Image: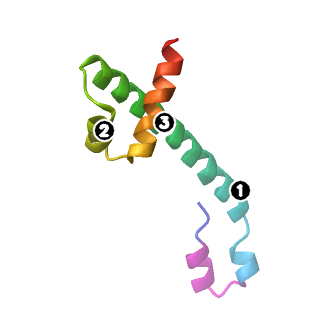
Amino acid sequence: MVNVAGRLENCELGITAANGISTQRRQVGEAIDEFRAAWHQLLLAWFAIGDEDGASISDLGQVLGVSEQLASRLAGELTSCEL
C-alpha cells in the first residue's frame, strides 16, 4: 500500500505523495464490498438456523446485534429464498 504519511515525512509534495492512492482506494472499496456480501450471507445462515430452532426474529436480531428493521428484512429475505 502507498505510504502517504511516509512520503510526506520525506518532504514529497502532497500530490506526489498521494500518487497511486486511487488504485488502493478502489481495492479497499472492493474488499469492503466482498466483506459486506460475506457478512450478509453469514447473517442469513444464522437466521436460517435460528428459524429451524424456533427463535423469534426479535431474539435473533438481538443476539446478532442487528436492528429490528434489519432482522425483519433478513427474515423476509430468507422466507423469499425458501419459496
- Where is 28 relative to 72, above or below? below
Q: Which residues are magenta?
A: 4-13
Closer to us: 3 or 50: 50
Please state which amino acid type lies under the numbered disc 2.
Answer: Ser
- Picture coordinates of residue 53 (x, y %)? 24, 20
- Picture coordinates of residue 45 (x, y %)? 39, 25
- Where is 33 relative to 28, above or below? above
Residue shown at the point (53%, 20%) measured from the top left: 80
Q: Which residue is mark 2?
A: 58
Q: Quadrant of residue 13?
A: bottom right
Closer to us: 12 or 58: 58
Decide if residue 7 is on the left or right side of residue 70. right
Closer to us: 23 or 41: 41
Numbered disc 1: secondary structure: helix
Q: Mark 3 or mark 1, which has the lower sequence index?
A: 1
User: Tag 1: Cα neighbours inside 10 Å, few (<14), some, or many (≥20)?
Assistant: few
